Amino acid sequence: MIEHFFQCPYCWEQISMLLDSSIGNQNYIEDCENCCNPIQIECFFDNSELSDFRAINLEQ
């Protein structure tokens, strides 16, 4: 597990998330812990290291 910090695409607060690099590439929706809006999370791993992370506003 790795801790990754990013900004919420709605409220712009910095939040952290634990990512499991053993699963591989991931795509799921999780609510912001601050404003509770749904964020589409996309994370990509290369040899168990985070290579790309996207936090996407679903209202765009």
Image (cartoon, rainbow, N blue to C red):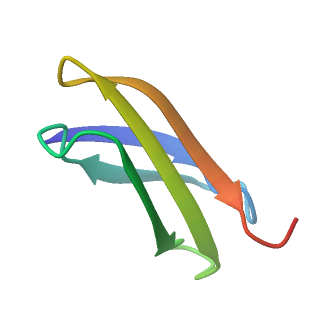
Horizontal and vertical percent position of residue 26: 36, 50
Q: Is residue 54 left or right of residue 28?
A: right
Query: Which is more toward the observer, 2 or 26?
Result: 26
Q: Which quarter of the image is occupied by the N terminus?
A: top left
Q: Residue at x 11, y 40 (%)?
A: 22
Q: Is residue 29 left or right of residue 58?
A: left
Above or below residue 30? Residue 54 is above
When asked about the image quadrant of residue 56, the answer is bottom right
When asked about the image quadrant of residue 59, the answer is bottom right
When asked about the image quadrant of residue 12, the answer is bottom right
Q: Residue at x 34, y 41 (%)?
A: 25
Horizontal and vertical percent position of residue 23: 17, 46
Q: Residue at x 46, y 72 (%)?
A: 30
Q: Residue at x 53, y 43 (%)?
A: 6
Residue at the right extreme of this rendering: 60
Q: Which quarter of the image is occupied by the C terminus?
A: bottom right
Q: Is residue 1 left or right of residue 36?
A: left
Above or below residue 11? Residue 35 is below
Horizontal and vertical percent position of residue 49: 25, 21
